[in-house]
Amino acid sequence: MDKNLLITQIKKAQQDVASAALWMQDAVANFHYKRGYLAALQASLQIKENNLEKHVESQN
């Protein structure tokens, strides 16, 4: 293989790796955001269920 072709391919591969790393960082951040959002929704549901139970108990 020609040296210049190898250098070109190496530079392209480096750019691809850098791009993939940025994509992965974005994906990880998105995952953590969605996991936090899910936890908040679950906590909200738990609070509503607890309030409903207390309301039902107070009616008895």
Image: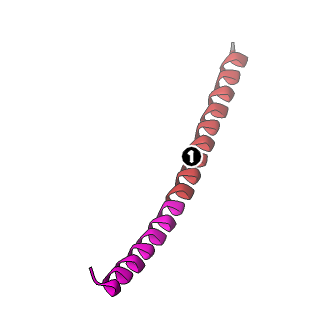
Residue lying at 56% horizontally and 43% vertically, measured from the top left:
38
- Residue type, mark 1 in image: Arg
Q: Going by the picture, which residue comes out furthest to the bottom? A: 4
Residue lying at 50% horizontally and 65% vertically, measured from the top left:
21
> What residue did someone put label 1 on?
35
Q: Nearer the viewer, residue 49 or 27?
A: 27
Q: In the displayed structure, would residue 58 be above or below residue 21?
A: above
Q: Nearer the viewer, residue 35 or 24?
A: 24
Q: Secondary structure at mark 1?
A: helix
Q: x, y (%) of residue 19?
A: 45, 71
Residue lying at 62% horizontally and 28% vertically, measured from the top left:
49
Residue lying at 53% horizontally and 55% vertically, measured from the top left:
28
Query: Which residue range is magenta in the image?
Result: 1-26
Q: In the displayed structure, would residue 46 be above or below residue 19?
A: above
Q: Going by the picture, which residue comes out furthest to the right? A: 58
Residue 2 occupies quadrant: bottom left
Q: In the displayed structure, would residue 6 be above or below residue 33?
A: below
Disc tally is: 1
Tell me if 38 is positioned left or right of 51 in this view.
left
Q: In the displayed structure, would residue 30 be above or below residue 54?
A: below
From the image, which quarter does the N terminus lie in? bottom left
